[in-house]
Image (tube, helix red, strand yellow):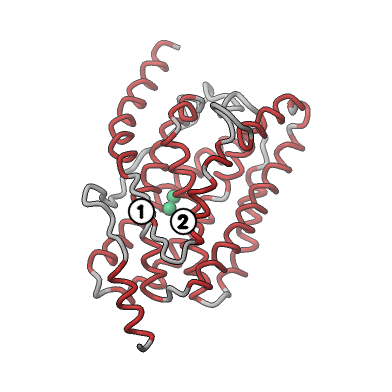
């Protein structure tokens, strides 16, 4: 069996996204204001630095993913669904970058050195743009598995959303919804243009190292600047939230199986059909926005 036949069979065997899921960019226009506290996640300096550092990776990181998809999508012109989904993906990610830039600028204006992460990404991205194109595609597909992982983590745990300040909560929900909606686009594009298992795992290792490094770097610089407000108790609570056991804790550990599914040779993002989260939270998003307006009026 030659390679192209293998790829055709592999492609045909893959799952399609559920019919109820559409990849349509929808604007949000978030605004943080004077009512937004410095510690907008669980009122916790540690956890806010974690998510703020993660947010700092989005404008540069999502632009990199958009550029990668643009580089490959002409190769799947014959696959009308995937080609159209690439357009939806590009539109959604462009919106995400813009909205996260608002939060990043807000945190910077409050004295947190978010720009240091953004600048770091600007410095290292040229290196990743020099990699072989197929490795860039594998890296992008793996990075999207991480964002799908966080999307599932957020939307599967309503108490997490409740602990995001009301001015930032819609961003969490909206971004999480769209990350689930388009979670298979870059994977399918990778699969259609390369699809080798070792490339996929190489991309995952690279994405893990990159995300781990940037988030740790962002947290370390922010925590150092904010060291007067960092406490052992808050840090311990934050670590328990990530890695602890029991109710309302250990969110990163609990979601680990989702992340590790990527290692299954026949993995596909829609093996795990979590599309019910999209329909549930699309309607909740409207209520959250209404709730936000009420809170502001009452204040
Ligand atoms: Fe995104
Ligand atoms: Fe994404």
Image quarter of residue 60:
bottom right
Instruction: Check mark 2 vs ligand 2: CB closer than 8 Å? yes or no.
Output: yes
Which of the pair 48/28 is nearer the observer? 48
Q: Residues within 10 Å of mark 1 (few under 14, many from 20)?
A: many
Which of the pair 208/88 is nearer the observer? 208
What residue is disc 1 on?
182
Q: Is residue 293 left or right of residue 46?
A: left
Local SS, label 1: loop
Residue at x 33% of width, y 48% of height = 273
* The label number, if any, that marks residue 144 in the structure image: 2
The answer to whether residue 210 is above or below residue 106 is below
Look at the numbered discs 1 and 2 and tell me whether their residues touch, using CB distance below 8 Å: yes
Q: Position of residue 237 (x, y in %)?
A: 67, 27
Mark 1 vs mark 2: which is more N-terminal? 2
Q: Position of residue 266 (x, y in %)?
A: 41, 65
Image quarter of residue 86:
bottom left
The answer to whether residue 54 is above or below residue 201 is above
Local SS, label 2: helix
Which of the pair 124/161 is nearer the observer? 161
Instruction: Check mark 1 vs ligand 2: CB closer than 8 Å? yes or no.
Output: yes
Q: Position of residue 289 (x, y in %)?
A: 35, 27
User: Looking at the figure, which quarter contains the C terminus?
Assistant: top left
Q: Is residue 111 left or right of residue 260?
A: right
User: Looking at the figure, which quarter contains the N terminus?
Assistant: bottom left
Q: Position of residue 281 (x, y in %)?
A: 33, 34
Give the CA distance from mark 1 to mark 2.
9 Å
Residue at x 37% of width, y 68% of height = 189
Q: Residues within 10 Å of mark 2 (few under 14, many from 20)?
A: many
């Amino acid at each position: 069996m030659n390679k192209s036949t293998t790829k055709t069979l592999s492609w045909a065997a893959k799952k399609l996204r559920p019919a109820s899921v559409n990849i349509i960019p929808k604007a949000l226009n978030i605004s943080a204001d004077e009512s937004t506290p410095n510690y907008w996640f669980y009122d916790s300096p540690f956890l806010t630095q974690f998510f703020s550092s993660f947010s700092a990776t989005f404008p540069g990181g999502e632009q990199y993913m958009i550029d990668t998809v643009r580089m490959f999508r002409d190769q799947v012109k014959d696959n009308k669904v995937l080609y159209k989904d690439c357009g939806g993906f590009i539109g959604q990610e462009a919106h995400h970058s813009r909205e996260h830039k608002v939060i990043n600028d807000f945190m910077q204006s409050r004295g947190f050195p978010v720009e240091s992460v953004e600048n770091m990404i600007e410095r290292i991205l040229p290196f990743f743009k020099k990699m072989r194109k197929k490795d860039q595609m594998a890296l992008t597909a793996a990075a999207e598995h991480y964002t799908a992982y966080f999307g599932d983590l957020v939307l599967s745990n309503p108490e997490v959303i409740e602990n995001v300040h009301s001015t930032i909560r819609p961003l969490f929900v909206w971004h999480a919804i769209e990350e689930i909606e388009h979670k298979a686009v870059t994977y399918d594009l990778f699969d259609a243009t390369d699809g080798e298992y070792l490339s996929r795992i190489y991309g995952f290792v690279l994405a893990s190292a990159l995300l781990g490094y940037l988030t740790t770097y962002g947290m370390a610089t922010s925590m150092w600047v904010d060291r007067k407000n960092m406490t052992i108790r808050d840090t311990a609570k934050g670590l328990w939230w990530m890695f602890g056991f029991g109710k309302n804790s250990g969110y990163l550990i609990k979601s680990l199986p989702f992340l590790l599914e990527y290692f299954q040779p026949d993995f596909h993002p829609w093996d795990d059909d979590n599309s019910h989260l999209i329909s549930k939270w699309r309607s909740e998003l409207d209520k959250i926005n209404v709730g936000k307006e009420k809170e502001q009026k009452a204040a």
